[in-house]
Image (cartoon, rainbow, N blue to C red):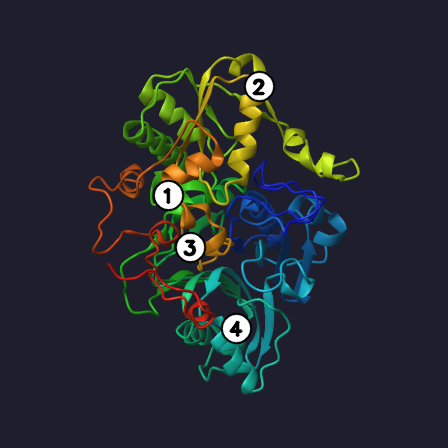
Amino acid sequence: MPDGNMPPAHPFDFDAVNSDGDKLKEECGIFGAVGVTDAANFVALGLHALQHRGQEAGGIVTYDPVEGFNSARRFGYVRDNFTSQTLMKTLPGALGIGHVRYSTAGSKGAAIRDVQPFFGEFSMGGAAIAHNGNITNADALRRELVERGSIFQSSSDSECIIHLMARSLQRNIPERMEDALRRVEGAFSVVAMTRTKLIGVRDPLGVRPLVLGKIGEGWCLASETCALDIIGAEYVREIEPGEMVVITAEDGVQSHRPFRPQPSKFCIFEHVYFSRPDSIIGGQSVYETRRQIGVELARENPVEADLVCPVPDSGTPAAIGFAHESGIPFGMGIIRNQYMGRTFIEPTEHIRNMGVRLKLNVNRALIKGKRVILVDDSVVRGTTSRKIKEMILDAGAAEVHFRIASPPTAWPCFYGVDTPQREKLLAATMSEEEMCQHLGVDSLKFISLDGLYRAVGEAEGRDKSCPQYCDACFSGEYPVEPADMIKKGFQMKAAE
């Protein structure tokens, strides 16, 4: 879990002792650069732009012809580690990759050995790899590899890829990576590097994102386009589902197709919450998509009220769209304290209960006597929503109505998102009306799955026979069977 010195990504995701938050945790962020002077500096900047995807730890590996491979892995924020000139001097070279982590598999913040990128020395030279996603057959692969003599250094599922590469009989590292990834099930976007090559791969379904950029004479790969913006790189294109690119400073980008083509299943929650609003996905502005979600939400679930307020910061674009479509004024009814870090007072029970108020405060002059619509991106456990409701009522609101910019989250994600067990998801055990009563609000409404699909550009809504996105957390329809979890007793949704 995030270190106590670091504010969580979502302002309500706070517990001074347990950090047991109420928001889905953004998987991981990956970045790579080749053909640029001091690649580590570009990688650090790219990771800084991707910090929202993982706040627990980060790592960078570089290669220099004289110094060879060098790496640095640290707990905490990029800004607190990879801005040190002393540290960055230990990472020379024109080729590097990096990773920011929020653990979705393996121990939660247990050891530095779990922090990526992972490095392996093969007969044809070294290679490093960074992975965003989750391998759904990692347990089975690990058992097989250990029985055959592999020695694992971490608890991360991603390390399986390095060991599969080591056992491959292919001639070079890109071919060994292809060989390894054909054994892997689940979701993965990967950046990897050899002494001369930067490699990027997306799984056949394209669940997790990866984009290609051009920086001067060099190239870069990133989880999101906002990481290209920070270094002044030109966005070239998305790496396509099932595509592998092998990039060198001399020969540029070479594309391969190591997997059997399948229909794309990009994670729809990237549009709702994970990606930064200033990123571009599939040619669409994430901000504009979220604003359109608010428009659809207002059309589907109107209510008489005086004020539309976002839950900062992730609910803001949807709240703007809701207000515009409904004609109800938009207002910042909740103000975020941007400078709040850890609790600076001894965390007694009384202070723990104040945790939310240290991070956010209600704009009482705006709220008092008003019928308020609160727009948030999701409801997971419901603890967040109850705290928000209490704060708004304490400030004198006449009514509190929740409008949620995603369908009910009723199923866990096994593709690189840290989700609570299914029984801890409010929507898994309660109807919408029961959730409304549980939260104690005047009304609670979610956008429909079809409405969400319309907002992301599918005019006809969701194709039930072959959904255009991975929406398993809402629908319970998993595009890749979570083999490891089924063996542990997870019950899949019954066929309809």
Q: Earlier in the sequence, mark 1 or mark 4?
A: 4
Q: Amino acid at mark 2?
A: Ala
Answer whether labels 4 and 2 touch (C-beta < 8 Å).
no
Left or right, 470 with respect to 33, comes to: left
Q: Which residue is mark 1?
A: 431
Q: Which residue is mark 3?
A: 208
Q: Amino acid at mark 4?
A: Cys
Q: Earlier in the sequence, mark 2 or mark 1?
A: 2
> How far apart in space, not on screen, are marks 1 and 4 (Cα)?
40 Å
Q: Secondary structure at mark 2?
A: loop
At x 52% / y 16%, what residue is drawn? 367
Q: Earlier in the sequence, mark 4 or mark 2?
A: 4
* Marks 1, 3: nearer the viewer: 1
Q: Is residue 220 visible?
A: no
Badge 3: residue crowd in 10 Å (few <14, some 14–19, many ≥20): many
Residue 63, image quadrant: bottom right
Q: Amino acid at mark 3?
A: Arg
Q: Secondary structure at mark 3?
A: loop
Q: Which residue is mark 4?
A: 160
> How far apart in space, not on screen, are marks 4 and 3 (Cα)?
18 Å
x, y (%) of residue 441?
45, 29
Query: Observer-nearest residue: 332 or 357?
Result: 357
> How far apart in space, not on screen, are marks 2 and 1 (Cα)?
29 Å
> How far apart in space, not on screen, are marks 4 and 2 (Cα)?
52 Å
Residue 83, image quadrant: top right
Q: Amino acid at mark 1?
A: Ser
In the picture, the disc for residue 395 is: 2
Query: Observer-nearest residue: 191 or 375?
Result: 375
